Image (cartoon, coloured by chain):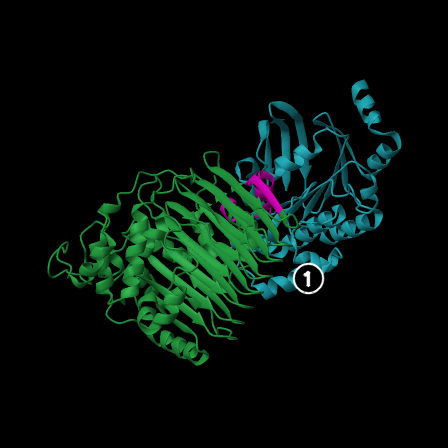
Amino acid sequence: MATKPENLEALVQKKYTQGFVTEIEADTVAPGLNAEVIAFISHKKNEPRWLLDFRLKAYQQWLKMEQPKWAHVHYEPIDYQAISYYSAPRSVKDAPKSLDEVDPKLLETYAKLGIPLHEQKMLAGVAVDAVFDSVSVATTFKEKLAAAGVIFCSFSEAVHNHPDLVRQYLGSVVPIADNFYAALNSAVFTDGSFCYIPKNTRCPMELSTYFRINASKTGQFERTLIVAEEGSHVSYLEGCTAPMRDENQLHAAVVELIALDNAQIKYSTVQNWYPGDAEGKGGIYNFVTKRGDCRGRNSRISWTQVETGSAITWKYPGCILRGDNSVGEFYSVAVTNNYQQADTGTKMIHLGRNTRSTIIAKGISAGHGQNSYRGLVKIGNNAAGARNYTQCDSLLMGDKCGAHTFPYIETKNASAQVEHEATTSRINDDQLFYCRQRGISEEDAVNMIVNGFCRDVFKELPMEFAVEAQKLLSVTLEGAVG
Amino acid sequence: MLNIKNLHVSVDNKKILKGVDLAVHAGEVHAIMGPNGSGKSTLANVLAGREGYVITQGSITYLGKDLTVLPPEQRACEGIFLAFQYPVEIPGVNNVYMLKAALNAIRAYRGQGPLDAMEFLNLAREKARVVKMKDELLGRAVNEGFSGGEKKRNEIFQMAVLEPRLAILDETDSGLDIDALKIVAEGVNRLRSPDRAIILVTHYQRLLDYIIPDRVHVLSDGRIVKSGDRELALQLEEKGYDWVRGETAAA
């Protein structure tokens, strides 16, 4: 149902007239996607005109695009008209009243991960009247950031309070028509995070979405924009190790990072969305576009990801190494157990001189899991002296899973150096026996060996995240051997 | 402590041990010698509970328990330690971290509380001195990038920390130069005690110059064909394994 641009003006003025479920629950739009729905979202969020235009333009592009089919993943076609693109946070009366009403399996996992009780309630979506201690934590946190001049807020707030910054950078790294899911996100994104680090500022703390989670529900089409001005430095943590409950099956987020001269951005993700049950029913489709632009000289962007959740993961956090001497890094652990599928990797686009990139990807497959590394290293004409080092290691547990590697290398400059190393191994019986002979149980031995396999990536994570990631890995792979 | 009776073991349907009888008491050091392929390492692995070694006949009793039904980690918790002929490398796993996990697993089995990081580190440093192991090796990944001698020393270091009741050393002397051999032997000698037994599996007599065994057994073609005291090892050194083979054939 395409809308011609000339109709847009009328549309913007017009109130949303259809699709409400009832007048009382007027905050949920009926399933389906068209220009009116987009106008409704924009209107609901009280957005400026340019942002609505941005959305509608993306929508027009999206209509012409097709769902990508090249990834090594299989699933039933998604009916995009069956999805509701706007819904206010779940009403309190639908939420579980206490932890007694929450799936005991979920609670068991929380216990294993050592998550405090009040956080368990938050994660499980239990209705609570007051927001515990985290209010005071969040307040001190905000004061400290404000003192440093750092802006860290929800995307919606940024649109209203810092419109010029958002307008300048939004879509400048991931263009609206970059790919099918990015276009969809650009049309319908509901909220996300915005972060701006001023010139020559070192962000005084790790920024974490975790602190923001109470403020607004992130939703299934999340948008994140991080801008690091000249000489600034920021470390950003996304997600948390606890499995998050979510009714939405499709998640299509877009993350854009911009690093100017001498700026550094470190972006760490722990993704643990619901992976579906042991038979492969249900689970989140995580189709994410993440890209960083090393726009300035000597800038550096590092992606570190630990992907253990979701039924299907499709993501390639990349770096455009535009500035001379800029550095891109990608450290990844992707785990697929049961019937999970992951097609993940990175893109390193070398444009500037003496740009360098490092890729360390560790894939672990267990059960019937299918794990693919897909990575592009591209060296442009002018990228004299560019260097890349790629290392992909796969670990197989059991004989029904799969590991695949799809490296793409395109070089247009003869002075570039590109190295690629790949290994595939099984959990080694000799290593297992060695540990067990020392008194360590088989399960602990497996965890130890797998964690050792992932060490090169875990050591890139901020300390407390790394500890959680190890625990998460062992919970994810529970029962995978033996 | 250990009682092996008429033990028959096959690997991949090939008969390796063909009726081994052996009794080891607390406080004793036994040396098992024999030519290549006689079944020495098989015996060591069977005692530790390695998969793929099928017991077709006979019994192994350890401290009054049927050892054959216990999984490897439980045998370790019961005090059995195998110093590996070829210690494996475990990339990314810190040497001390693994050992601490091992010690605390064994302590938990015995109903003792875990040692914390500081207590453990002090213990580890003290024991590392016994085998003159560099501190630097403690913090490296398990056996990764260790020289042959360092790997063997690491085995003895682990043994010193875990303080087993029954230690089985599988060709720990192979590949060691004389200095390393002395250090390893000293480490083993320090562990000798009235409530501990040690089985040395070795091809050569020279280890027995430094660790004096109470009993020496010669394994040939899956059977113990001769047992004696230290003199037997010296005789073997002089006459070679053919001497034992010839003697048993003649008998």
x, y percent for residue A314: 41, 47
Single out the residue that lies furthest toward the right.
Answer: B238
In this rendering, position of residue A89 left or right of residue A422:
left
In this rendering, position of residue B224 left or right of residue B111:
right
Q: Residue at x 35, y 49 (%)?
A: A181
Q: Residue at x 85, y 29 (%)?
A: B240
For the record, the magenta segment spans: A419-445
| Residue denoted by label 1 | B125
* Front residue of A423 and B133: A423
* Tint of chain A: green
Provide the secondary structure element on which disc 1 rests: helix
Q: Amino acid at mark 1?
A: Arg
Confirm whether residue B63 shows in the render. Answer: no
* Front residue of A214 and A65: A65
x, y percent for residue A227: 45, 67
Give me the chain that's cyan: B
- What is the number of callouts on the image? 1
x, y percent for residue B75: 57, 43
Confirm whether residue A429 shows in the render. Answer: yes
Pointer 1 chain: B
In this rendering, position of residue A479 left or right of residue A438:
left
Residue A429 part of the magenta segment: yes
* Front residue of B149 and A413: A413
Displayed quadrant of residue B30: top right
Tell me if mark 1 has few (under 14), some (14-19) or many (20+) residues whose alpha carbon lies within 10 angstroms of its own. some
Above or below for B134 versus B202: below
In this rendering, position of residue A24 left or right of residue B89:
left
Above or below for A47 versus B186: below
Displayed quadrant of residue A191: bottom left
Single out the residue that lies furthest toward the front.
Answer: A6
x, y percent for residue B213: 78, 43
Residue B58 part of the magenta segment: no
